[in-house]
Every structure is written in C-alpha cells, then in structure tokens.
Image (cartoon, rainbow, N blue to C red):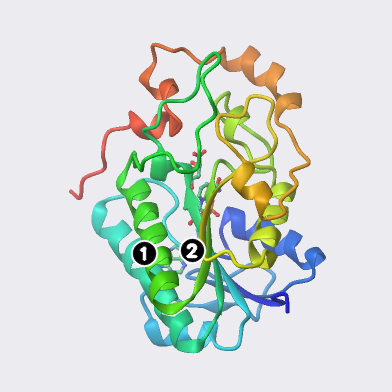
Amino acid sequence: PAPRTVLLTGAAGGLGTLMRELLPAHGYELRLLDLLPVEGAPDAITADLADRAAVREAVRGVDAIIHLAGISLEAPFDKILRANIEGTYNVYEAAREEGVGRIVFASSNHAVGFTPRPQGDDPLIPVDTPRRPDTFYGLSKCFGEDLAQLYWDKHGLETVSVRIGSCFPEPTSVRMLSVWMSPADGARLFDAALTAENVGHTVVNGSSANTRLWWDLSGARALGYEPRDDSEPFAAKLIAEQGELDPDNIGHAYLGGHFVSDPPIWPY
Ligand code: NAI
Ligand code: 15L
C-alpha cells in the first residue's frame, strides 16, 4: 500500500514550511519534527537529530520519512558533521530499528556542484555524473547518498535521494532559472518518490521543467514525476537586473554557483 503517514524532519525550515502546506493535498498525514518549534503546529516534535531516543520515538509507526532537517548551507565542518552526517545516520538507524520502509532524502546539487554547467550545445548533466562536492555541506550530501545505498543493500530500506536544485517560491538569481524547482513541483516530486515502486536506492535530479535546464530529469520522470512549472516567466526581469551569466566568472561556471567560489568556512 502507498505510504500515508510521513515524518517530515526539518519542518520549521523554508522547504519544510512549503511541504507541510502542500503535501496534505497529495493525501499524506504528516508528523513534524524540527530543532525549532514549528509555527502553528503545537503537536510538532521539537528535537535535535543528535538525540537518538527522540529520533527513534519520532519515526515509530510512520510509513515513510522525508528527511530535510540539517544545515542547508556551508558551515564549519564540526557543525556539518553533527547535524548532517551524524544526524542523518541517526535517522537511518532509527528507521531500520523501527522498520520504516522508505526515506526521501533531501540531497543537493552541491553534491556535484563542481560539475561545469552546460554551455551552448553541451548535453544536460546526467544523474550519474561523478561526485564533485563544492563544500563540506555538499560532502555531507554525498555521505547521505552513500548511507542510503548502504541501508538499501544491507537492510532493504529504500531511499530516493533527490538532488534538489533551488526550491523556493520564486527564482531569485539568473543561475536559479536553470535549477529552480517550484514548491508545487517539489511536492509532486516528493509524492512520486514516496509512491514509486521498487526504488531500491535511486538518486534523481530535482527541478521544474525549466527552459534553461542544466540537468537531466529523466530519472525523476521515471518515478512518475511530471513537472508542470518553468522558471522562464521570471527570466526577463532577473536578467535585466543581474545580467546574463558570465562564462569568465568562476561563480557562474559550475552547477553549484557561488558555493564553488565562496571561501571555506573554518572553525575559528
Ligand atoms: P532550512 O535551513 O530552512 O531548514 C532546515 C531545518 O532543519 C531548520 O528548520 C533547522 O532548524 C532544522 N535542523 C537543523 N539542524 C537540526 C538538527 N540537528 N535537528 C533537528 N532539526 C534540525 O533549509 P531548507 O531550505 O528548508 O532545506 C531543507 C533541506 O533540503 C536541507 O537538508 C537542505 O540541505 C536541502 N536542500 C534544500 C534546497 C533548497 O533549495 N531549499 C536545495 C538543496 C537541498
Ligand atoms: C542548497 O543546497 C541550499 O540548501 C539552498 O539554500 C540553495 O542554496 C540551493 O542549494 C541552491 O543551490 O540554490
């Protein structure tokens, strides 16, 4: 049977807020978890992913998990280690112990952010492009994908790892025109990732059907995802404000955008 009860980790965040508004219309009952209180949701579980007992209790009885919680930008390695690496391990271990069958893991374009963006007639970036993390943050997403593969191969716990482009209400940069995933398409993709059969561990690229697309969406479509949005209506205004992408600017040359050229954040 299709999963119905879903634990949404990271429910207080930007994407979590959008998804808790949109996913109930796809037929899901959400249990919410975040480090921070979730506005307007008094029943949400307030817990740190580091708290193994709390995470185990949170996953008990759900059909599936959408795992969004964690640090969503570059940060000192120690913080990434705790929230994204150990935190994701704790979610997988709790899911294994409680017999949860499916996780949708919020991976990121930054797992492969050092992949040159297509220019001219270059082919779209395939989902099996070699890993090229652009940050410690992106590296933590590589870890999450490998953890998902291990838990499938060893324990039969299924995952769809969605390498999300940029999921925000509107694209806010010229780069985002190529990687934007509208919130409605995000909900469609998560729904497909929850319901497609026999996914084992599948990695997919996640964005809308943008005119200026940089990567291949065939893997997501194979799950049943049918994107309906395109960033193109936002293009003229963003290009007028920011100019076209400059091929000589390193921050414009790769899938990961400015993540590749930002200086690393060391712990001071
Ligand atoms: P966000 O930073 O707005 O939300 C993350 C949430 O996780 C926050 O509410 C935070 O309190 C919670 N959190 C952090 N550490 C935690 C911990 N130790 N225990 C429990 N909760 C914790 O990020 P956003 O944009 O909502 O992204 C959600 C997920 O999707 C993240 O994993 C991010 O890496 C991933 N993603 C998002 C993209 C986007 O375009 N929004 C693109 C690619 C990936
Ligand atoms: C991400 O992985 C981040 O979580 C999000 O905040 C955006 O920066 C997005 O990638 C992006 O590449 O635009």
> What residue do we see at 64% from left, 33% from top?
171
Q: Position of residue 99 (x, y in %)?
A: 52, 86
Q: Nearer the viewer, residue 7 or 43?
A: 7
Q: Is mark 2 within 8 Å of ligand 1?
A: yes
Which residue type does callout 2 highlight?
Ala
Q: Are marks 2 and 1 in contact (CB under 8 Å)?
A: yes
> What residue do we see at 53% from left, 82% from top?
59
Q: Position of residue 248 (x, y in %)?
A: 39, 11
Q: Nearer the viewer, residue 149 or 139?
A: 149
Find disc 2 in the rendering and name its residue.
Answer: 69
Spot the residue most to the left: 268
Q: Position of residue 234 (x, y in %)?
A: 71, 26
Q: Nearer the viewer, residue 31 or 127?
A: 127
Which residue type does callout 1 highlight?
Ala
Indicate the secondary structure of the residue bearing disc 1.
helix
Q: Nearer the viewer, residue 54 or 189?
A: 189
User: Above or below — where is 184 with respect to 22?
Assistant: above
Disc 2 packing (10 Å; few <14; some 14–19; many ≥20): many
Find disc 1 in the rendering and name its residue.
Answer: 83
Disc 1 packing (10 Å; few <14; some 14–19; many ≥20): many
- Residue 48 in view in this figure: no
Q: Is residue 225 left or right of residue 134?
A: right
Q: Is mark 1 within 8 Å of ligand 1?
A: yes
User: What separation in Å lies between label 2 and label 1 (alpha carbons)?
Assistant: 8 Å
